[in-house]
Image (tube, rainbow, N blue to C red):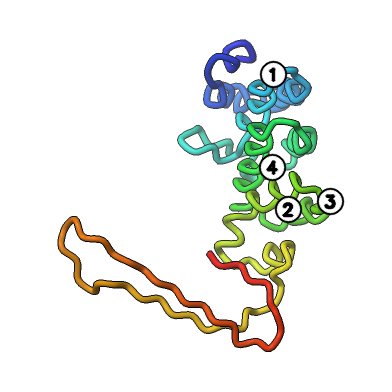
Amino acid sequence: LRFFTVFGSAEFAVRPFIVADQERALKTLRQWTKDTDEKVRRLASEGSRPRLPWGMRLSTLVRDPSPTLVILEALKDDESLFVRRSVANHLNDITKDHPEFVLERLEAWDLGREHLRWIAKQACRTLIKRGHPRALKLFGFGKKAEVTATLKASPQCLELGERLTLTAVITSTSRQSQRLAVD
């Protein structure tokens, strides 16, 4: 699979090996985090994602994602955005079952480093959409927004092929500047 992933993708093919012998498979994936090829390094993260879309769910890693932390920590500073994006997606998968587990780790990262902040934001995207207070606080959105908001749709009735225009107006009601996350 290490050879094959350079020419295609093996994240679906590696999953049965993780199910059959998680310890040995993850040991191999940990070794692959040091590979010179970014596609092999990405396979280490992508292949061990608990909830890979369209892939076999790794139920033991859904229940306890901690065995993959060594892989994610090894790859979070990878020079390749391709690899770092996989780390972010992997962490986002984990937030769906263990949000506090992920937030605890991200809070220990130096989010002043741009690439780590980017990974953290991508990893928390589901939590942010849900308004998770701790995730919002991690990015400086800890206070309740003081705003009024209106959303208008025009026209109110459409014929097939016509365009709909949505207009959102968000007005601050605070006397002080505020940091907002609008999604």
Query: Could you tell me the amino acid type at mark 2?
Result: Phe
Q: Position of residue 80 (x, y in %)?
A: 70, 31
Q: CA distance from mark 4 to mark 1?
A: 25 Å
- Residue 74: which quarter of the image? top right
Residue annotated with mark 3 = 110
Q: Is 145 or 131 nearer to us in this picture?
A: 145
- Residue 180: which quarter of the image? bottom right
Q: CA distance from mark 2 to mark 1?
A: 30 Å
Residue annotated with mark 4 = 65
Query: Could you tell me the amino acid type at mark 1?
Result: Asp
Q: Residues within 10 Å of mark 4 (few under 14, many from 20)?
A: many
Q: Nearer the viewer, mark 4 or mark 3?
A: 3
User: Mark 2 or mark 4: which comes first in sequence?
Assistant: 4
Query: Could you tell me the amino acid type at mark 3?
Result: Asp
Q: Residues within 10 Å of mark 1 (few under 14, many from 20)?
A: some
Cβ atoms at labels 2 and 4 below 8 Å apart: yes
| Residue 37 circle label | 1
Q: CA distance from mark 3 to mark 1?
A: 26 Å
Q: Nearer the viewer, mark 2 or mark 1?
A: 1
Q: Position of residue 183 (x, y in %)?
A: 53, 64
Residue annotated with mark 2 = 101
Q: Could you say whether the residue bearing mark 4 is in a helix, strand or loop?
A: loop
